[in-house]
Amino acid sequence: MLVKLKVSKRTTPGRVCQRLKTSSTQKDVTNNRGFCPCSLNPEHLRTSCTNSKHESRKFFELTKSWVKGGKLTKEKAKKYLSEILHSVFFIGHINIPSIEPDMILSGEKNSSLKKRLEEVFPDVFKNYTTHLPLRTPFSILLDVVAQIAGDQSLDELLEVNKKMQVPQDNGQICGNDFCLAATVVSYCYFEDKNTNKKSQRYFGASVACTGKAKRDFFINLSCIKTWNRKVALGVCMAAKGKKSILLPKTVYSAAFTLLNDQRDDDRGGHGSGQRYAPRAPCQKCWVIFPDVVFSPAECDEKAAQWKHGNCAECEAMSKLLNGESTVDGGVEFDEPPKRLTTDAANVILQPLLRARIDNIKNILKKRVELGQELVYYEP
């Protein structure tokens, strides 16, 4: 799932396309509809489809090994597999030009795999052009890893990344443009000052999609449906230049950037592994979550060119609030601050979401069969 390139603190959190050279100002280089222009290159398209085939098989093999090893139940494995497949197929379908399942799963070696998938996941093949995925493939994969490894998920994630890599003829390691890896991963936790007990770590990833339109789609969709309503409100308010939500003061957060040692000047350009290096929160993270204790504590002063909600912290915080009722119940909002209920957050959110719903419908126009209401894929 990974591309062999150096990712620095100046890189937009998410995924950088292998052939897309981003300037220091981080302008998003896309075609007029916000989709990555690399996908229009036939050779690049073929390579990406080939990599998708290999990665699909590797992921299925990994999942089987987790089930066999007792780390994952068959029921949960099937749920995760169906969700990832649907997300990959959907992202390929809305790409310009479209990349359909037949292209991703073509070839003699994959014919049996395709047949098996159609038998086991008929709803995925039926619904990828009508139902919207709730998250990117990498966010789903991160959930699997977090369930298996718990607080040690970063180490496990590096191992999974290594196994998912697809060697190329030129000796490099390449991913594909549809089943993407995030360059930034974050975790957060809550410490109860009365008992000094810490909650488990909750992990999140930056929005992992090539092209502005796809990133906008997943950020907007997360605000509309996927994220905890209070986190969604914080992102929407911050994007409007207004005061965000206030979390309990004992919420802690840390983020890490994925680096490839072969291109890492700090390591002398030697080595072939990958590692996660600590990353300071950007200005937008401080605005969305002003009371959170970040590590590193300093703010990355470089202008954040990405949208509010792109950062890994948002997904991680959403999972924290969903998983810890004490934290969720302690969220405050308004001036002077007062406790914010989920119902109250929903009421405030509704007018803020209209433009985001319109944006999704515009992005998907003529590409997805949308009804009056948005329909989601929830296995």
Image: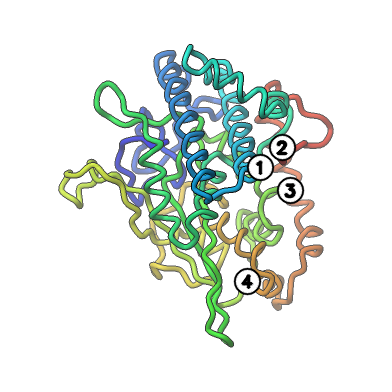
Q: Residue at x 41, y 32 (%)?
A: 17
Task: State how far apart marks 3 and 1 are (Cα).
Answer: 16 Å
Q: Is residue 358 above or below residue 232?
A: above
Crowd band around label 1 with a 10 angstrom C-alpha radius: few (<14), some (14–19), many (20+): many
Q: Is residue 270 above or below residue 282?
A: above
Crowd band around label 3 with a 10 angstrom C-alpha radius: few (<14), some (14–19), many (20+): some
Marker disc for residue 246: 4
Residue 346 pos. (x, y %): 78, 58
Marker disc for residue 134: 1
Task: State how far apart marks 3 and 2 are (Cα).
Answer: 20 Å
Foreground label between 3 and 2: 2
In the picture, residue 326 is in which quadrant? bottom right
Foreground label between 4 and 1: 1
Residue 283 pos. (x, y %): 47, 60
**What amino acid type should be assigned to the residue bearing mark 4?**
Leu
Which corner quadrant holds the N terminus? top left
Mark 2, residue position: 377
Q: Residue at x 40, y 31 (%)?
A: 175
**What amino acid type should be assigned to the residue bearing mark 2?**
Tyr
Task: State how far apart marks 4 and 2 are (Cα).
Answer: 31 Å
Label 1, secondary structure: give it: loop
- The first of marks 4 and 3 along the sequence is 4
In terms of depth relative to the viewer, which is nearer, 194 or 117?
117
**What amino acid type should be assigned to the residue bearing mark 1?**
Leu
Marker disc for residue 353: 3
